[in-house]
Amino acid sequence: MFSKVLIANRGEIAVRVIRTCQELGVATVAVYSELDRDALHVRLADEAYALGGQTAAESYLNTEAILDVAGRSGAEAVHPGYGFFSENTEFARAITGRGVVFIGPPPEAIEIMGDKISSRLAAEAAGVRGVPGDNTVLTDPAQVLAFGQAHGWPVAIKAAYGGGGRGMRVVQRPDDAAAALESAQSEALKGFGRGECYIERYLTWPRHIEMQVFADTRGDAVWIGERDCTCQRRHQKLIEESPAPDFPSEVREAMGAAAVEVAKACGYVNAGTVEFLYQDGEFFFLEMNTRLQVEHPVTEMVVGIDLVELQLRVAAGEALPFTQDDLVGRRRGHAIEARINAEDPAGGRFLPAPGRITRFRRADGFGVRTDAGYDEGDEVSQYYDNLVAKLIVWGQDRDQARRRLIRALRETVIEGVATTIPAHLAILGHPDFAAATHSTRWVEENLDLSTLSAAPATDPASAGDPPEPKVRRDVDVEVDGRRYRVSLWVPETAQAPVAGAVPARPGSTGRSSRPSPRSGAGGGGAAGGTGNVTVPMQGTIVRVLVEEGDTVEAGQTVCVLEAMKMENNVAAERAGTVREIKVRPGEAVGAGDTVAVIE
């Protein structure tokens, strides 16, 4: 086993890996951006190193900075978590090239399966059917039109190097093809560093079922169990469960065997997930995620295996401690997970809701587990994923687990940011979910969330004063007669500790005491009385789609806002002429800021 592991990630998954390492007596090394200086994973790790920067590109996607920390800390292995560099071939090669173990598959397997196009080809070579599609990289909307005309609408444009629904656009009709392709490529490039996309059929009422596989360095591979991840919005998962309900055992066995064949076809090692779409008794290969999945805890609850520990042991060269036959007797009961995201689900919009968590009360009781990357007082930043916590429950059967999760969600209290908890309660309490007749399109097309209201404002009496912004001050100190220059992060109002201290770099705190010059009335869309088009949340403008003097209709998109790795259309609520554009692409905005004026 390793003596020290660097976790090249943040939030909930970094905390998750740190805790297992601590149980095994393995020292942990955390890395952090300027905004995550006081984050929970930093507080829990044995050592922590600054990467610099605020955005993911400046910090957690900075290969050289992470390699430098690996060298300075003496870490023997790197766990990439999920997202960021977890499925990046170049990063895996850079790590192993330094003589450090990458806790995941070999770079060659990531290269095959990390590219969704080559993974489809590999699955076909292994005899596993994929969703009908075209494996050619899209470069022109004409390709989308040709595929749609040949196979029917709607069709799905998907990021070749993506996952989690990002970089995916469903094209309902030919007129939407050009804008959908541009948007998918843009989101894929920002989220994964690669903009390549491909196209496939969009199944009308499928279920999303995935298989957890594990392979060791000795050539043995098994499927541990399946997860049903059908409840989604914007092609991103909300609720996951294991085992899949109303799922024939013969299909389960066939799907598990197919998943193992896909893993063996690319020389896979460590934890992986093979995803399928299931419809009308048939299943189709969708993609393989060459990492640990967000929803892995439901598998852990059903089979009683710590998958992170198993990752560490396999990466250290140990054999799988069980065979496929051994796993049959380990599966018991039912587990369901709800992803608690910082999003406001009011009216079914699911708008990103960054901010400071002023209160966080976790649920408790038999069969209840909370995996969180934040605690009370922590800030959920617009620059990163919006996952706050995962609430996982176990029950003797599905209905007991469903009722237990409803109770646990009601017991969970998060204030300061809006969360998806109201949407989870609506899903779990619906007869369609109880009967398992839902599909991946059910939440957006059938579930009525119109009555959900915005999260209540935080009670000022319980919120407390917000933490004072800190600034960096570089000072000279002497230790045993040797002079050092060190950086101190002190409250903004603190006076410079010594003469000659260097002021903080502009923007280094990630906060500003200067009011925004564009501030307008809060809320999304436009204020009908003034014609001010305002943004509903903090984020970054990625595209401005109108010009001054243009005539717009009510509901027309004025600009596209990126927040928490998701693109959101900001639309005009009234028709008129664009009198003024107040933002440019790449500019950061805050909730309520005016981006355009319509008269």
Image: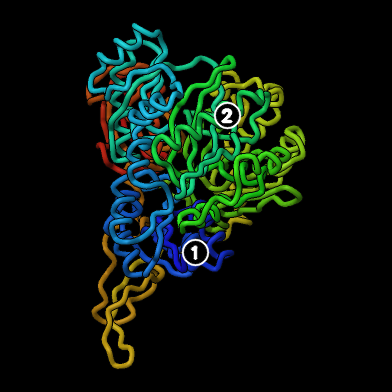
Residue tagged by mark 2? 231
* Residue at 23% in and 23% down: 139
Give neighbour class at mark 1: few <14, some 14-19, many 20+ (Cα, 10 Å). some
* Residue at 59% in and 34% down: 226
Distance, label 1 to label 2, CA atoms, is 38 Å
Nearest to the observer: residue 340 or residue 197: 197
Q: Which structural element holds mark 1?
A: loop
Q: Position of residue 235 (x, y in %)?
A: 47, 28
Nearer the camera: disc 1 or disc 2: 1
Q: Is residue 67 above or below residue 176?
A: below
Q: Is residue 454 above or below residue 201?
A: below
Nearest to the observer: residue 333 or residue 348: 333
Q: What amino acid is at disc 2?
A: Cys
Nearest to the observer: residue 552 or residue 474: 474
Q: Quadrant of the C terminus?
A: top left
Asked whether, in this view, residue 229 is left or right of residue 189, the answer is: right
Q: Can residue 340 be seen at all in this image of the molecule?
A: yes
Name the disc covering residue 97, or none.
Answer: none
Q: Position of residue 348 (x, y in %)?
A: 55, 27
* Residue at 70% in and 38% down: 334
Q: Is residue 457 above or below residue 248?
A: below
Asked whether, in this view, residue 179 is left or right of residue 169, the answer is: left
Numbered marks: total = 2
Q: What amino acid is at disc 1?
A: Met
In this view, the residue farthest toward the bottom is 481
Name the disc covering residue 1, or none.
Answer: 1
Asked whether, in this view, residue 421 is left or right of residue 268, the answer is: right
* Residue at 31% in and 31% down: 596
Asked whether, in this view, residue 548 is left or right of residue 131, the answer is: left
